[in-house]
Amino acid sequence: FGKLNGNLSSKPLNLPFKNYLNLSGLFAFILMMHLFFNTESTGFGVSLLIAAGVLACVMGVHLVGSVGGGDMPVCITVLNSYSGWALVAEGFLLNSTVLTIVGSLIGFSGAILTKIMCDAMNRDIFNVLFGGLNNAPVAKGADTGPKEHTETSVPAVAELIANAREVLVVPGYGMAMARAQTAMGELASICRSNKINLKFGVHPVAGRMPGQMNVLLAEAGVPHEWVLEMDEVNPDMENNDVVLVVGANDVVNSAAYEIEGCAIWGMPIIEVWRSKKVIFCKRSMGGGYADLDNPVFYKENTDMLLGDAKKSSDALAAQVRERLEK
């Protein structure tokens, strides 16, 4: 939660000999389990249970902390699957068929979702399961020189959209946090009713899990036909007059292609920089879960609309409506 909420650094926790620490914890669990099943002392058995609980907490923090911020959405589905298997074990202990069946459903669904997300992010599932088993190589090709971005305003963006014919909106977790999906749905309806082909391009892992953006847009009244997948929008990216990125970062970060060895290297992304104009609507110039600077911010065809996504989206919808009604 701390990494996803921005309270903790998104960088992975790389303690010395961390893989040996994980193995030592596993062997300690096995040893305590053996002693627990073979002891006749109640006090010693309780002490073993307490020790196992403490060790579980420590190992849990270490395993999750060792996963980089960019992979944290996958880590959530892994933990969801783990909770299901824990429920299965509880069902066996209590001889409860209901708990066993429900736990199996949660465990399998979490495991399937984890596999889907790992495939979408080009990630090694074992690296996520075992807390960053393989250390990422040092990133190559990163530009450490001074960078300048161009900021824009709501009226300027509204004018761009009003004069466009093809508009793509790429939503992300920032849109969900700001609850800006209703304003985006309103903007889409305004554009569509004025012969501006506005559609939404959704990355498979945008947000915290697959389908989150689709659900939010459906709640905002956006028809399913207006929402396209990454593989559907990338081939036609050059035809988009304006791409509006609302609260997304890692899923449109060109570092995945340009900076070898970075936290999201090799991850399939929505290639927004290939469009004619890119507008980023976000709170600040900060990175996403992966805590990586986004080279797209500094490209010539990119402008930054900084501020609260909800206020910016509401103002943008209102000004586009006003501009098109003239």
Image: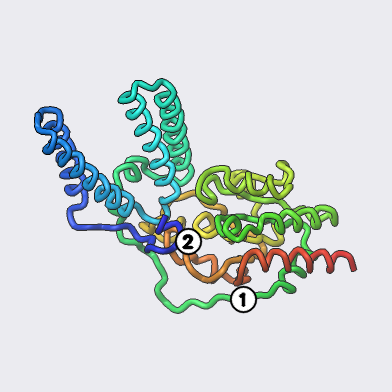
Residue 171 vertical placement versus 74 (above, below): below
Q: How is the image coloured?
A: rainbow
x, y percent for residue 290: 42, 59
Mark 2 vs 1: CB contact within 8 A: no
x and y, in percent, of residue 297 in the image: 54, 68
Pinpoint residue 126: horizontal percent, then vertical percent: 32, 40
Question: Which label sits in the foreground, 2 or 1?
Answer: 2
Question: Which of the pair 307/124 is nearer the observer?
Answer: 307
Task: Tell me the crowding category of disc 2: few under 14, some 14 to 19, or many 20 or more residues within 10 angstroms, Cα based.
Answer: many
Give the structural element (helix, strand or loop) at label 1: loop
For the point 74% across and 47% down, which residue is it? 221
Foreground of the two, 143 or 157: 157
| Depicted 60 relative to depicted 2: above or below | above
Q: Which mark is residue 288?
A: 2
Q: Residue furthest front?
A: 42
Q: Pick whichever, 205 or 82, lies toward us.
A: 82
Q: What amino acid type should be assigned to the residue bearing mark 1?
A: Glu
> Amino acid type of disc 2?
Gly
Q: Which mark is residue 251?
A: none
Please tell me how crowded label 1 is: few (under 14), some (14-19), or many (20+) other residues with Cα within 10 Å. Answer: few
Disc 2 element:
loop
Relative horizontal placement of residue 82, taking residue 326 as reference (left or right) = left
What residue would you read off at disc 1? 151
Residue 97 location, quadrant:
top left
- Give residue 71's position: percent from left, percent from top: 41, 51
Q: Point out the image quarter for the N terminus.
A: bottom left
